[in-house]
Every structure is written in structure tokens, then in C-alpha cells.
Image (cartoon, grey):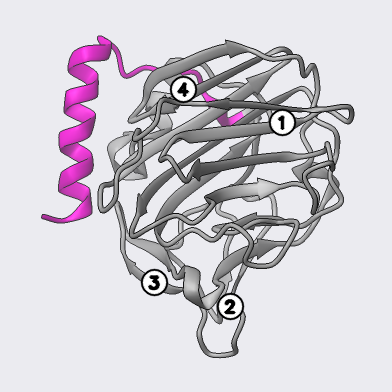
Amino acid sequence: MNGTFLVRCLVLAMAASAGTAAGADPSDHWLARWSFDAVEDHQVPDVSGHGHPGQMRALEAGAGPTLVDGMVGKAVRLRAALGTDVRVQRHDRLNPTTGLTIAAWIKHEGPIDSSAEILGKKGQARYIVDGYRFYVSRTRSLCLEIGDGAAVSRVQTERKTIRDDTWYFVAATFSSGRVRLYVNARLVVDEPVPARQIAPSTNHLVLGNFAGRRNAFPFNGLIDEVSLLDAALDADAIFALARPSELRE
């Protein structure tokens, strides 16, 4: 069963329950988007047009991430044992302060020793209270961390939300004082947090591993259609992001 067929089934199911597929246009809020469909020489284009490409890397030369069939087109396959990730050069624009949306299709494979990073831009140690992290915990909760410069706010779903060998569309939003988490375009967590802003991080942005320390929290499996925006999108807009481009017409 190919990825596109799975997405079409999911979209139909979500539409039936949500009652609408119309979401707010995110075009004014894109920071970056990586689809993995036009990778050349290990460079992953930023298809948002904002010029933030990613570099596919591994701990050993020649052992980098690979491209496989994804939900639409290609996805990146990451291997925890090889220390694989996709690094995006640091840029002030990738430090949103008052609003954030992170979204991606993911399929994790195998055990998680500590956590499995989807996307992050955060400092090295636990006491560093800047940036943001979006990841799957060892207990298979979907988590978002926000550092406001004084403390870290952490919000998570129930345990066993993310199971192995299954595609999920996951998203997290932050606006001043609130975090929302979505699984398959359904709102599953809506919580107030102390954070009123995101403190800028000087780290690179990294997909599939921890930004602060190499291969600390590796993701093992597939990641596709990653979106990063500087506002907390509403539920309709999250629903729209879940659909591949040819299903958005």
C-alpha cells in the first residue's frame, strides 16, 4: 500500500470527522519546509523559498541518511546507530519568539533509549533554557519543549501515542502561554504554559537528532513533509498541512 493511498484514506477519515477541510492560509508565516523530493548531493532544499536548506549527515562518512518512498514522493530514512540527521545552518529567522508551528509525517521504527528528535533548535544541556524541541519520548508520548530564557515548558501527549511502524501526521503549536499538540490533524492536547516567548537559540536547527549534542536523541525511521512556521496555526490550517501538495488543490 503506497504512501499516497494511505494519505488519501486518512484525509477522507479526518474530513468526515472534522466537518471541514478549510484551513487558514499559512503563506505569511512560513519559516522553512523540507519535502525531501529534490535532494541533490545530500542537500535538502527548503521548498518554502526562504533559503534554509538542510545537509544530510552521519557520524561516519558514506553512512548518511537515505531517501525512500514516503507519504508523497520521498522521505528521509534515519538510522540511530549511524548518528544520522539533517542539519540546517543557524539563522536568526529560525528563532521565532511569539509563535511557532512544527509539523511532519513520521514513522518511527524500533526502540527509543531516551527520546527521538523530530526537529529541534535548543541548547546543549538540560539547564539551557532557550529554543524549542519536538520529539517522541521513550514512553512514546509526543512532546514539545519551549525555553523562554528562564525555564523550560514541556507538554506531552499520553503514553503510547506514537507506535512503531505506523505513519502519523504530528504537529505542535506555541503561542504566548499555550501549547497545542495534534496527532493525525486531531487536537489531542491543549495546555497553558508559563512561557510567553521562545528565547533565541544559537544552535543549528536539526531534524532527526538533538541540536545540542551529536547523536544524543536520534530518531530511527522515516520523516517526511516537515513544516516550520512562526505562528500558532489553527486546527483548520493544521488539517491543511497534513495533506500532500497534490491533495491541497
For label 2, the residue is 58
Circles 2 and 1: CB distance less than 8 Å? Answer: no
Sequence order check: which comes first, mark 2 or mark 4?
A: 2
Q: CA distance from mark 2 to mark 4?
A: 34 Å
Of 33 and 151, nearer the camera is 151
Q: CA distance from mark 3 to mark 1?
A: 30 Å
Q: CA distance from mark 2 to mark 1?
A: 27 Å
Q: Secondary structure at mark 2?
A: loop
Q: CA distance from mark 2 to mark 3?
A: 14 Å
Sequence order check: which comes first, mark 3 or mark 1?
A: 3
Sequence order check: which comes first, mark 2 or mark 3?
A: 2
Sequence order check: which comes first, mark 3 or mark 4?
A: 3
Place residue 18 in its image quadrant: top left
Quick one: quadrant of the N terminus? bottom left
Residue depicted at x 79% and y 54%: 124
For label 1, the residue is 146
Residue depicted at x 41% and y 40%: 140
Residue 54 horizontal/vertical position (percent)? 63, 64
Q: Nearer the viewer, mark 2 or mark 4?
A: 2
Mark 4 nearby-residue class (10 Å; few <14, some 14–19, many ≥20): some
Is residue 33 visible in the rendered image? The answer is no
Residue type beneath disc 4 = Ala
For label 3, the residue is 67
Q: Secondary structure at mark 1?
A: strand
Residue type beneath disc 1 = Ile
Of 85 and 226, nearer the camera is 85
Mark 3 nearby-residue class (10 Å; few <14, some 14–19, many ≥20): some
Residue type beneath disc 3 = Leu
Above or below, comparing residue 56 to residue 138 in the picture = below
> What label sits on residue 237 in the rendered view?
4
Give, as a single range, the part of the protein colored magenta: 1-27
Circles 2 and 4: CB distance less than 8 Å? Answer: no
